[in-house]
Amino acid sequence: MSGDQNILLIDDDSDAILSLARALKAAGITHPIHIATNKEQGLSLQHEYSPQVIVQDLCIDEAIGPESGFELLRSILNHDSTCRVIVLTGYGTPELGVTCLKNGAASFLEKPPDISHLSALILDGIKQSDLRRNYEQLSKDSVSLTNIIGESDAIKKLRKEIEYAASNDQPLLITGETGTGKGLCAQAIHKLSKRSKGKYVRYQPNFSTPDLVNSDLFGHKKGAFTGADADRSGLLVEADTGTLFLDEIDELPLETQVSLLGVLQEKSFRPLGSNGEIASDFRLICASNQDIDQCVSEKKVRQDFYHRIAHARIHIPALRERKQDIPLLAEFFLEKLRSAEKVSVISLENDAIAKLQAYNWPGNIRELQAIVEGGAYKAQFESRVSIIADDLMFTPKKLSADSEASFHDLVEDFKLTLIEEALARHDGNQVKAAIDLQMDRSTLRRIVSRKEQ
């Protein structure tokens, strides 16, 4: 209901508040009017209906007096600063009016108010509140793109593609190497889209069995398969009205691809073991770090599924293809670390920037973040306020131009390095490390287990 235009009246005198509501409707106010007779009820209705305008009595609690109205006013605006509050009072002193305005009230009127005057203030308040809410939404939208860092032509093009993708609801496929920011791109599209009020749900198949993947996505009824000891609602239910982001779709079981085809067509599905259909309206964004055309030719991705999920495509360039963005990215990660952990290192020296730009970045942006953070910790340990080239620690294997390791091996080694660093930061806690890396815990465990084999 937050998208509607609502009015809330709060007064401890129930007869007076009902009379005011009737008078406003008689004066031509057609917007829904809600009434409350105490602070708790008023704040509850504000949370439920998000009214643009609240008309409140200054003395909402006779035992406390005007201070009760000031307290309510502050609570209202703390919850929603875009709301316009009109205060009514029987006291009518200039000092109280000034205090109300200082506390954020839009207007202050003596009782009984002139209904035509109050109606005009309410209608104007609705317009002002809508303007403020639109401005806040635009500000949030801008923030969604500020995390797409860079000024290269490739990143300027990517930002335009993100804005276009957010303007429509068609299924989207994002491609790019590991660590380029496919998840960040998908999240920006969600936040900029009309579905931003719904949930953003991320899922990776992680080499799971078809039964487990289907259970994760579609949910199941108790007893649907061995180990299903309780009902479970799947991620498709969670993503209803929002966005479902499926990462590494080349690992999605073929039978799950078939099932998803039906969901995308019919907007409904049947949980495992259920006799009934459940409706779900979500926007699907998929991603892969593999050559998707090769995946189709090798039948890892069904051709009909590919055509259904790739109505539009976005390719994120590798970091080595936009090295001019490295200084901005490095400063961004340094500032982020400084804000989060109060690291006193404030800049990177020119030799450090040159070293970063000379590297080929098999792990892309994720690797850059780890290297910059490591350099910051080293500089701070050495009591310096800037990062120098010697602070940036690359493994010899990654720096070697004639290393025989494959690109895949380099990426997997870097993933393991990131995980080991995250585990060290979180005292071996895999759940916290996975959250830190924005990675599913099962993926983290799989990569760690490879080292142990």
Image: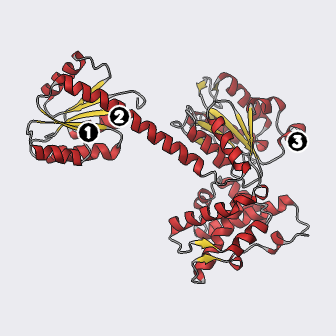
Q: CA distance from mark 2 to mark 1?
A: 10 Å
Give me the residue at 56% from left, 32% from top. 240
- Label 1, secondary structure: give it: loop
Q: Nearer the viewer, residue 45 or 174?
A: 174
Instruction: List the residue tagged with mark 3.
Output: 294
Depth check, mark 1 against mark 3: the one in front is 1
Percent from the top left, x then y, of residue 373? 63, 69
The N terminus lies in quadrant: top left
Mark 1 residue type: Ala
Corner quadrant of residue 308: top right
| First along the sequence among labels 2 and 1 | 1
Answer whether residue 234 is visible to the viewer in this image. no
Q: Earlier in the sequence, mark 1 or mark 3?
A: 1
- Percent x, y of residue 254: 80, 36
Mark 2 lies on a secondary structure that is helix
**Residue kind at label 2, given as amino acid type:** Gln
Q: CA distance from mark 2 to mark 3?
A: 54 Å
The residue tagged 2 is 128
> Do residues under tags 2 and 3 come within 8 Å of each other at their CB atoms?
no
Front disc: 2 or 3: 2
Q: Give the class, few, some or many, for how many residues have Cα within 10 Å of label 3's Cα (few <14, many ≥20).
A: few
| Spot occupied by residue 72 in the image (x, y as percentages of width and height) | 23, 44
Q: Are marks 1 and 3 in contact (CB under 8 Å)?
A: no
Q: Gap in Å between the C-alphas at discs 1 and 3?
A: 62 Å
